[in-house]
Image (cartoon, grey):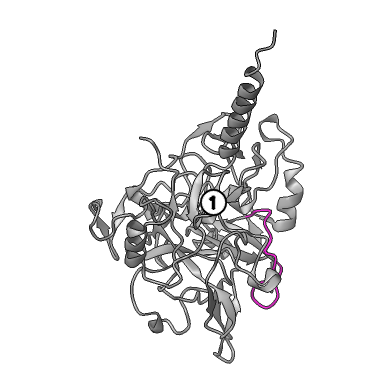
Amino acid sequence: MEIAWIKPLLLICTIGTQLLNAAGDYPIVDTAQTKSYDTRKTIKQPTPGNSFYGQDAVYETNQPRYRDNADGTISDLVTGLTWTKDAGTKKTFKQAQQDASKCRVGGHSDWRLPTIKELYSLIQFDGVDPGPHSSQASLKPFIDNSVFAFQYGDDRKGERLIDSQFATSTKYVSTTMWGSETMFGVNFADGRIKGYPIKNRRGEKKFYTLYVRENPDYGQNDFVDNGDGTVTDRATGLTWMKADSLDGMDWPSALEYAENLELAGYSDWRLPDAKELQSILDYTRSPDTTNSAAIDPIFECTPITNEGGQKDYGQYWSSTTHLSARNASTAVYFSFGRGLGFMQDRRSGKYELLDVHGAGTQRSDPKVGDPSRYPHGRGPQGDVIRIQNLVRCVRGGLSES
């Protein structure tokens, strides 16, 4: 005899299990940043209501956990992804694509070139961005080099110390520089995502490559508009502001804004860490191809007028400090609009404002200061410096411990 309530109960249990499984498809790994910083240096962990409370180290999420399988592979016990341990020698983008199908590490034949979201799951912000006179002995990369084989750039080959860019399968839907076809890669030497031209004047650029297998759904969002000014990503379990802060602000103000936000009946909002913020980027969108920010249109993004007078979209602060060999004066942001920079012509000395790194790039800005002090940006590609960046707060995802 069939009991009438069994089928509905089984259906509810099945749906509940499916939802729980879906929520586990895209777990965000903690940044591994355990120290707190003010605008220059390390400080004691701040307490609620005090300056710099709400930064990355204050909140603990899914801690990185790896298993070395002793066969040339590494299992990420948080994401469910399995990686090759050794990036080997550098390859062109085309070679990196082709060699995935030939890879047989660990006896597996289903390796793939990772997406930018898969590869970024490995970044750790306990690393230190090298200075021009840094030695390798004093540095710490932005990947766990006790787990993965890591190499800085080789000066014997004419490379810079920071030439440790890793390839992904994610190509920019627009172009960078002067119309170059571009791939988004992660630099584990200096802790950034940039769009790298696949070819340059010297030929095809070469990258280190880690291949990945398992959990092919990693990095795929499942957004739901809650109808109360918030959006939940059922893939990550995080809930976001649907709109942004509307106005830009410096980093200490961004932390304060997030800690004081009350929205949709919740007061536990916070500034997202770098890896959480990267999770909502949409690398199929850009101002020049979709006339939008690089984010799902379920979200609202405040348009800006950029340094060249174009309609564009802003840079958004994370709670994560970008530590350099000099100090802790910068924090991580993501460009949801063009990744602009001032490129200087070596012959004429004139500067040209270009999309140098693409919509979806991760760079860093001074936490405080006057952006007018940087009329031609900063760094090798003249990254624009704004300091007054936008904010989109997050809630959920914290470790129960």
Q: Quadrant of the N terminus?
A: top right
Residue type at the position of mark 1: Asn
Residue 355's spot in the image, x, y percent?
A: 60, 75
Secondary element at image label 1: loop
> Which residue is more in the foreground, 174 or 23?
23
Residue 117's spot in the image, x, y percent?
A: 59, 51
At x 67%, y 35%, the residue is: 105
Residue 227's spot in the image, x, y percent?
A: 54, 54
Q: Residue furthest top?
A: 1
At x 53%, y 31%, the residue is: 68
Is 180 inside the magenta-drawn segment? yes
Left or right: residue 250 compared with residue 228:
left
> Which residue is more in the foreground, 386 or 191?
386
Q: Residue furthest bottom?
A: 348
Left or right: residue 286 compared with residue 385:
right
- Crowd rating for badge 1 (residues with CA inside 10 Å; few <14, some 14–19, many 20+): few
Residue extent of the magenta highlight = 167-181
Residue on which the image places disc 1? 226
Is 21 inside the magenta-drawn segment? no
Q: Is residue 350 above or below residue 161?
A: below
Answer whether residue 282 is visible to the viewer in this image.
yes
